[in-house]
Amino acid sequence: MSTALRNLEMTALGLGFLGLAWAKNKLKGYSTPNGVAKTDEEGQIAYLLDIFAALRRFMPPGFDLRGRDVLELSPGASRGNGVLFLALGARSYHAIDVFDLAGAEDSSFYARLLERFPEGAPADRARALTLASGPGSREFGYAVGRDFDIPRLAEGRTFDLIVSCAAFEHYDDPASAITAMTQVARPGCEAVHIIDLQTHSRWIREHDPNNIYRYPEALYRLFAFPGQPNRQRPDAYIRSFEAEGWSDVRFMPSRTVDPALREASLRGLAVPFAGRVDMAILDGALTGRYPGIVRSAGVSR
C-alpha cells in the first residue's frame, strides 16, 4: 500500500476514533485517566512505579527531596506518587485536579505500593504511610475544583517541586495553567512535567501515532470534549514557561516514532504541523527552574 493511500485510510479511521472518544465522554464523562483498570491493582502499582521513576529521572542531578513541599497537578486515579515522595523524605505532598478520581482511594493500596518500593529511610516510609492513611492530613493534601484554580486549590501553600504526568496535553489553555502554577512556585522551585504528544486512542495510537495532527483545527474541534488533547507542541510549552520567568526550560524527548512508521507518520499532516522538525517526538519531559535568567532553551535532540 502506498504511503498516500495508507494515510488516507488512517485519516478516515482516525475520524472514527475521534467520534468514539467524543461519544464516550458524553456518555460516561472523564473516568479513565490511564489505560490500567482501577481494579487491576498490580497494574496500577507497576504504572505508578514507572511514572515515579520517570519523574525522578528528569529531576536535576543531585536533587534532594528531603524537606521539600511537592505539588502534583492532575494525578488522576491515584495519589501514589505522593506516598513515594514522602517515603523519600519530602515534607509534604499536595495534589489538585479537576475530577475527584483519587479521593476515595483505599489507604491499604499505599501499603502495598510501599512494599514494592524499597527506597527511603524506615522513619520516612512509616511517616508516609501514616500521613496517607489518616483523614485530611495537610501534609498529604488533595483538592478538586472544576475551575482548576491552582492558587485557590493550593490552599495558601507554595512549593519547591511541581510535577505532572500526561496532564498538560489535556489542558485547554496550557499557558493559563502555567501562569497559575507559577503563582505557587517558591524561588528555586523545580518543575518536571511529562507530556504525551501523540494520539491517545489506543489502537490507532500504535498504528498512526500522529493521527490527531492530520486534521484542520475546525474539523478537530468538531469532536471537542473536556480533556481532548490540545495538540500543542514542545516549543509552545517552552515559550509559555519562559514568559512566566522560568529558567533553563527544556523539553527532553523520551520516545520518538518507530522508524518503520516514521515516513507515513510525518506525511499528510495538517498545515500547522506539516514539515515541523519535532513531529517525530511522541513524548518527553519539560523541565525548568523558577525564577532565573534564561541561558539556553530548546528541544533537546
Image (cartoon, rainbow, N blue to C red):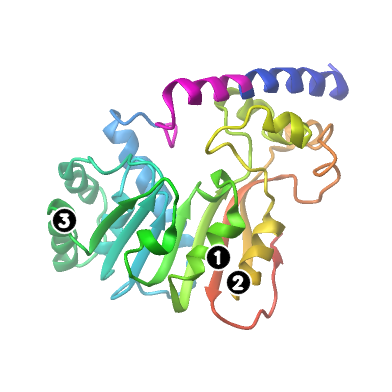
The residue identified by callout 3 is 129
Question: Does the residue at mark 1 contact the one at mark 3 (Cβ under 8 Å)?
Answer: no
- What is the total number of numbered labels drawn onto the structure image? 3
The residue identified by callout 2 is 244
Which quarter of the rendering shows the N terminus? top right
Q: Which quadrant of the structure image shows residue 196?
A: top right
Earlier in the chain: of badge 1 and badge 2, it is 1
Residue displayed at 22% across by 64% down: 139
Crowding at dot 3, Cα within 10 Å, few <14 / some 14-19 / many 20+, comes out as some
Residue displayed at 19% across by 60% down: 128
The vertical placement of 216 against 55, above or below, is above
Q: What type is the residue that disc 3 sits on?
A: Leu
**Range drawn in magenta:** 19-35
Which quarter of the rendering shows the C terminus? bottom right
Q: Which quadrant of the structure image shows residue 95?
A: bottom left
Q: Position of residue 101 (x, y in %)?
A: 33, 39
Report how far apart the C-alphas of labels 2 and 3 lie in the structure.
36 Å
Q: Position of residue 266 (x, y in %)?
A: 80, 37
Report how far apart the C-alphas of labels 1 and 2 lie in the structure.
6 Å
Q: What type is the residue that disc 1 sits on?
A: Thr
Earlier in the chain: of badge 1 and badge 3, it is 3
Residue displayed at 56% across by 50% down: 195
Question: Does the residue at mark 1 contact the one at mark 2 (Cβ under 8 Å)?
Answer: yes
